[in-house]
Each structure stands twice: as C-alpha cells, then as structure tokens.
Amino acid sequence: MAETWFTSDLHLGHDREFVWGPRGFKSVHEMNEEIISRYNSVVNMEDDVYILGDLMLGNNEAGISMIKQLKGNIHIIRGNHDTDSRMKLYNTCYNIVEITEGQFIKYNGYHFYLCHYPVLCSNYDEDKPLKAQMISLCGHTHTKDPFNDWDKGNIYHVEVDTNNCYPWNIDDIIERIKINKRKVVL
C-alpha cells in the first residue's frame, strides 16, 4: 500500500558549511549522498512525497540529476530558493507529479495546510478534536524541533533537519502530534 511522506529543505548541492555542518556532515557531497540514501531507504516508488520547498541550490544540472534519483511521486510546494528557472527544471523530472505554491490536503479525516513557511492556520480551536483542527506542515527555518512553532498554533516542521535527514511519514506525524497534545494537556 502506498504511503504519504513529507520533507523540506533538502538543499541538495548547497555547498555552505552552515547547511551541511549542523546536519552532521563533513561536506556537501556527503550530505547529498546521505539525504538521497536515507530518503530512498524509506520511500517506495508508488509513495507520494510532499517536498515543502528548497530542493536544491548551486549547480542546477547536478541538482536535477540528484532529484531524479529520489523515489516516489513527488509533489513540490515552492520554497524561497525554488526560483522560476528551477521550477521549469523540476518539470523535466519524471518523478515530479505536481508543483504548487501551497496546498490543503485531507488524510484519514485530518486536515493539513502545506507551505514552505510556518503559517498560522488554526482558529484557536484547541478545545476541538484534532480531526476538527487545521495543522500546518512547513519547513524553511532549519529547526531541529518539529514543534518549534507549536506555541503559535498547530505548526509542525518537516524539514530534513528535524528527522535526521529522513522524510516524515504522515502517520508518524499524526501520532507525534497526538502525544504532544496529551503532554500539553497534562
């Protein structure tokens, strides 16, 4: 059965120590190889993967070559480094099935808003069941804490920095949010 995954801010090819160093790598080459390897170790070809922006920086040709190595049906939510020229190149990838600026999705009764940036989309409805609330999935900040902005609303970070350079499975996200909500209530 196909699964659904989320990630963002891969920054493939971004040769800046402030990107690959905090992720635990000694070089951009090592980061690129490990992100692709870790991603492909959990994602299957039939899975849907939502990448919430900033797939690559630097050499576009090398970046596209790396993106074509990623498994799954990739849905891209545009990030601040996804320039118009990169967006055109993404359309040349066989594994990219959709490119949008932002998107609402529903999964097993849960409601999500997907955006590269942390977005407040709750309506101060914390007293309602989780399935009646909107959850914002985002990236951009390179935080290591997926709940970094939870105090501002239902904002959950999915950038590779939050999950040891692996994508997040949607069922795992939901379970972690349920556990976090129980802790807040206690």
Image (spheres, helix red, strand yellow):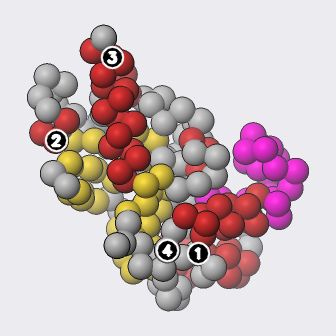
Residue shown at 54% from the left, 48% from the top = 159
Q: Residue 107 placed where, x, y %? A: 23, 57
Q: What element carries label 2?
A: helix
Disc 4 crowd rating (10 Å Cα; few below 14, some 14-19, many 20+) is some
Q: Is residue 99 visible?
A: no
Say which label, 3 or 4, has the lower sequence index: 4
Give the vertical position of 90 relative to 32 (above or below).
below
Residue occupied by mark 2: 131
Mark 3–mark 2 Cα distance, whole angstroms, equals 17 Å
Residue occupied by mark 4: 44
Disc 3 crowd rating (10 Å Cα; few below 14, some 14-19, many 20+) is few
Q: Quadrant of the C terminus?
A: top left
Say which label, 2 or 4, has the lower sequence index: 4
Badge nearest the viewer, 3 or 4: 4
Mark 4–mark 1 Cα distance, whole angstroms, equals 9 Å
Residue shown at 14% from the left, 22% from the top = 127
Please provide the residue range marked out in magenta. 10-30
Residue shown at 57% from the left, 41% from the top = 162
Badge nearest the viewer, 2 or 4: 4
Marking on residue 184: 3
